[in-house]
Amino acid sequence: MKTQLIRFLTALPLTALLGCDTAAPLAEEGQDTAPAQVAQAATTVSFAFDSSGIAALPSGALPTQLLPASAFNEAMVQRGLIGTSESFTVAEELGTRRDLESPSWRFERDISSGRVLVLNKVESGPATPQEPGVLQRNSVARLQRWGIPSGEIGEIRQVQSFLQNEEVGEVSPAELHRHKTFVLRAINGIRVQGHRAVVTHGVDGGFQRALIRWPALAREGHLLRTRLSTAEIERKATEALVAEGLTTGRVRLSWKYVPRQLTDGTWALTLQVNASLPSVNTDTHTEEPRVIDVDVNAVP
């Protein structure tokens, strides 16, 4: 039996690149007992907070330039993102999602969710040496031609994916499969949860794929700052951690914006804090890093 394994080569865990966030606990669980539990544990908890990530308070202002909703128009996807003059026909349509196809390309876009998927139907050519910095610059330039302004671009990471064939217990040497550029969305340097673009190039350096979740932001309705002090945020973080059954550990605090969709279809942001605990490795098990959401009473 022959299988293919895909792995990524990067200096960071893939979960960090993908921006994965842990889900918040159910609000109904333990509502009557949570305050008592926190008070009871207050004398035994011992968290060491690194609050350098929240030392600078958010300004509460949006950048002048934002990705326009018009970027999701079919002509802009074809011209700005793909960069082709081929004629497209509608392949499928469901609600706000529309799939289009040309001889060389296929793409789907959903303006409601701010999602775009582009696929090159032509396979990559033979592998040639590629400069990671050039691929990264080309990826960012492509996104900017589509309409993403530099003021919304946050952390960028360049990685490679590899393929390995496994047959009858024997694994072949790893073979380069794709070059991937992860571009995370940020507003004034603060990460927007769940919003990212992944631009993929083939082994010949040609553009092969883009998977984007980057909806247009509203001009109003955001909660971008907080009036809480660092000490108050640390107290709220302690309560959130104890509510999750945690009592000790090193905790790094950092800002993030959580998106929510408004009735007009645009998206607004709410300021929160990530309370991140490092992974734990013992002789018997490995515990993955944990990230707990902390409400900071965000205000406009």
Image (cartoon, rainbow, N blue to C red):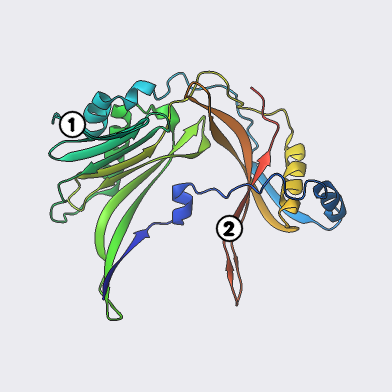
Please state the horizontal and vertical placement of residue 164, each as a whole percent of the image: 28, 68
Q: Which residue is mark 1?
A: 89
Side (left or right) of 123 relative to 134: left
Depicted 167 relative to depicted 215: above or below: below
SS for callout 1: strand
Q: Residue at x 56, y 35 (%)?
A: 257
Q: Amino acid at mark 1?
A: Thr
Q: Name above or below for residue 13 compared with residue 19.
A: below
Quarter occupied by the N terminus: bottom left
Answer few, some or many: residues within 10 Å of disc 2's Cα (few below 14, many 20 plus, some between 14 and 19). Answer: few
Viewed as shown, does residue 292 lie left or right of 128? right
- Determine which quarter of the picture holds residue 300: top right
Does dot 2 land on a helix, a strand or a loop? loop
Q: Amino acid at mark 2?
A: Pro
Q: Where residue 227 appears, x then y in whole percent?
A: 72, 27
Give residue 7's position: percent from left, percent from top.
35, 62
Instruction: Return the mark for residue 289.
Output: 2
Q: Give the image location of residue 100, x and y in percent.
A: 23, 34
In terms of depth relative to the viewer, which is nearer, 29 or 192?
29
